[in-house]
Amino acid sequence: MLVVVSLFAWPIPFLRAASSYQPHAPILISGNSGFTAANGVTSGSGTTSAPYVIDGWEINSTTANGIEIQNSNAYFIIRSVYIHAVQYSHYGIVLTNIANGRVENSKCSFGYSGIAISSSSNITMLNNQIFGNSIGANFGSAGGLGIGFSKNIVLRNNNISNNWRNELVIGSSNNITITGNILSGSAGIASLTMQIYSSADLTIVNNTISHSEHFGFLLDSSNRTLVYHNRFINNYPNAQQVGGTNDTWDNGYPSGGNYWADYKYYFQAQDNCSGPGQNVCTGPDGIGDIPYVLQTGQKDRYPLVVHDIVVTSVETSPSVIQGETTSIDVTIQNLGNVVERSFTVTLSFNNTLIASQTVTGFCGCATPYDRVLSFSWSTGVLLDKGVQPGKYVLTATASDLPLDANPSDNTKSRNPVEVISFPSTPLVSLDSVGPILTWGSAIISVATTGVAVFSVFRTHFRAKKKALD
């Protein structure tokens, strides 16, 4: 069975054009009665079918939190707002003791922290961008989004990136769904892309956790957490778990676990087998043959893999004399996260096969990360039929890769190579010259033994020895 998971279909939040925002002062709403037009409410009555809507504002949060709502059980939506500051002094959005709130299609940037949610329930965060915020002081210093003492929270398709210290921190909360988010680029001492502690009943699916200066994901003392179909890329380490019970790092077979970019580096892992025991070795299934083991010992039993062999270049001289043999270098890379057991690279000119090579055990795990394959192309016997003069396109193709993620980059062609004919008649006869004569556009040295050694000084020309009649 083949496992097909879209590993790189990252969500792109929909945001309105900057010119369509309207300026508004910071908003503070306390209690249901605070939802008024003066406080930025543009429509609604606070019910399930007609929630209050705060929409379209641009708010400078330099002097106060951009939007702060507290002590309310009214239904509301914060939609398409842009909150920013000129210094890291206040929060973008703060929700405290709230039920039934929603924040969507909004931006929070360059504040003390992006969004803070505490002691709240039934909150949805959808299609938001939170970026460039400072260290924060909420729930483990979350510069991006911090959630504490809350329940029934949904985070979907948000981009939380390039915040100082931590992108997402969740503490003492339960029944949390985190899906389709990009969490990337946290920086600072002991930075974490995502930290969850003292929480329970979490589902973490189809997120990208990448490019942290330190930890990607720290799961600390939390229970019943399900983590699968996420992409962990370039974090150090990608994930760790401390304590907790009934936490699972995969969704079983054949659904699979997570994509770990460092899988091949640490485990020299391959994908040659299938089945729940990965012991039916008749071909790949998109799941690694051995578990991915976290530094703290937990296992993703069915790590998702990507096969991606790329032909990056075809290099040779731009021209060759008919009858010569020229060298051709083909460079390949393994951009996937498994060692490729075996595949074939073929080289052809104008769809005519030159040669093929079998590549085995290709990891691309250490410098140099690419591999150069050397080929020879014989254009035939000098002055005989050989390859006819003309221009030829050289093409290298990597094949026998049934689950390659990007088949389009398995093939690479180079600019045409010109095969040049060597004149069959000298401009002067051999009898009428001394040891040097001109043959076509090349300079020929003639040995007294009757053997001509063609010393060709025109660029790219080299001729073989040939006995004279």
Image (spheres, rainbow, N blue to C red):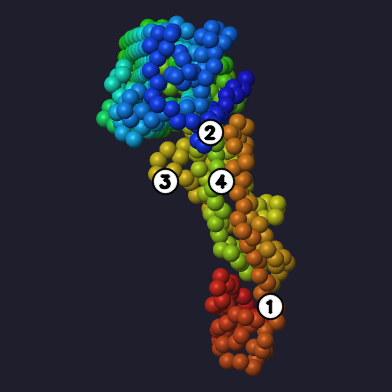
Q: Which mark is residue 368?
A: 3
Question: Compared to 47, does 211 lie above or below?
Answer: below
Question: Compared to 289, does 50 lie above or below?
Answer: above
Q: Is residue 361 visible?
A: no
Question: Compared to 257, does 457 lie above or below?
Answer: below
Q: Which residue is mark 1?
A: 423
Give the Cα separation between the discs numbered 3 and 4: 15 Å
The amino acid type found where label 4 is placed reads: Val
Residue lying at the far bottom of the rendered structure = 432
Q: Which residue is mark 4?
A: 311
Residue in the picture at 61% in, 92% down: 433
Residue in the picture at 55% in, 39% down: 309
Residue in the picture at 44% in, 8% down: 32
The foreground one among 44 and 155 is: 44
Secondary element at image label 4: strand
The spot of residue 409 in percent (x, y) is: 59, 42
- 2 vs 1, front mark: 2
